Amino acid sequence: MSRRVLVLAHTGREDSMIAAREACAQLHGSGLVPVMSDQQQRDLEVHFGSLDHPTEILGEDVELADVELVMVLGGDGTILRAAELVRGVDVPLLGVNLGHVGFLAESERADLAQTVQWVASRSYSVEERMTIDVTVWVQGHKVAHSWALNEAAIEKASRERMIEVVTEVDGKPLTSFGCDGVVLATPTGSTAYAFSAGGPVVWPEVEALLIAPISAHALFARPLVVSPHSRLAVEILNRTDARGVLWCDGRRSVDLPPGARVEVTRSDRPVRLARISATPFSARLVRKFELPIHGWRGPAPLGTNGAAAVPELPPQPWTGRSLGPLQPAEAKAEAGKDADE
């Protein structure tokens, strides 16, 4: 049975089209069947001429459900577009970073050939990333429903006007303030928009939801981490006529008039990401953000029995502990205490 890999690339960029042509050729050479969308294949043929390897067309020769893997060539934005495509099917995404940070990507452009070999040998695992359901209500009517892998961001629609909002967790109001917006994020999105807004970095395997205000004019407007089972809400207050706009992953938008309400809950449809290495998330943080780690010496050396080669201090009873010499003020206090007794 043929193994098919869908190649998705940002065909508006020269480097992305070159990488897509190389990926298709390497997949074919490894015994896999490269698949592309009709539009992307036409873009490649216009740019390079006819391709020198057979490529199947998605929706004509093969359906998405018959694809083993989607190889995404680009930055996080391209991967988010690919996540829209695989929404509702159990096809994992494997990102090859051609952008800047590329937190969602698994490998870099220089490792493209090796990445293809790993795919060919099935040397990859699949992990599930939690997503969120997003619902917009206006005057008691549901006006929009969407989802997000990274975040749902409520922003002010006008540069000159802050929006007045009230945040809510599990049906209880938390606090209200004027701000430029509020980010409601997943752990995957903690290193994206929420990170730029001052939110915490959350390890992807942690199940939680995040709230990060954007430039809030308030004394208490701190980023919060809440249960993944919580229901979050942000309401645009009617104190002013300032309007907002909702962005889901920076791709799908809904206008928010005064009085609009945005509700966010955990979705039961995760996004599946392919992993070709067991690199800890801490190492990914260091590499992507180029964090300084000079002077790190690592854990203590282990002894022959696997325990740390450090002598263990014996327990000492409380009455046998020495508190050291008393300071003058303390000695005077102790003397007065003895006299009273």
Image (spheres, rainbow, N blue to C red):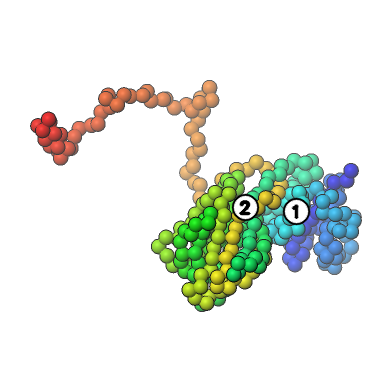
Element assignment for label 1: loop
Q: Which residue is mark 2?
A: 266
Q: Nearer the viewer, residue 166 or 101?
A: 166
Question: Quick one: quadrant of the C terminus?
Answer: top left
Residue 31 x, y percent position in the rendering = 86, 45
Residue drawn at x 55%, y 57% is 232
Mark identifier at residue 88? 1
Q: Amino acid at mark 2?
A: Arg
Residue drawn at x 67%, y 61% is 146
Residue 218 visible in the picture: yes
Element assignment for label 2: strand
Q: Residues within 10 Å of mark 1 (few under 14, many from 20)?
A: few
Q: Nearer the viewer, residue 327 or 226?
A: 226
Q: Nearer the viewer, residue 314 or 80?
A: 80
Question: Quick one: quadrant of the N terminus?
Answer: top right
Residue 90 x, y percent position in the rendering = 76, 49
C-alpha gap between disc 2 and disc 1:
15 Å
Q: Nearer the viewer, residue 182 or 302?
A: 182
Q: Is residue 254 left or right of residue 12?
A: left
Q: Amino acid at mark 1?
A: Gly
Residue 74 x, y percent position in the rendering = 71, 59
Q: Residues within 10 Å of mark 2 (few under 14, many from 20)?
A: many
Residue 98 visible in the picture: no
Q: Is residue 3 left or right of residue 329?
A: right
Please, is residue 202 above or below residue 39 in the view? above
Q: Is residue 326 left or right of residue 169?
A: left
Residue drawn at x 58%, y 73% is 257
Mark identifier at residue 8? none
Residue 141 x, y percent position in the rendering = 63, 67
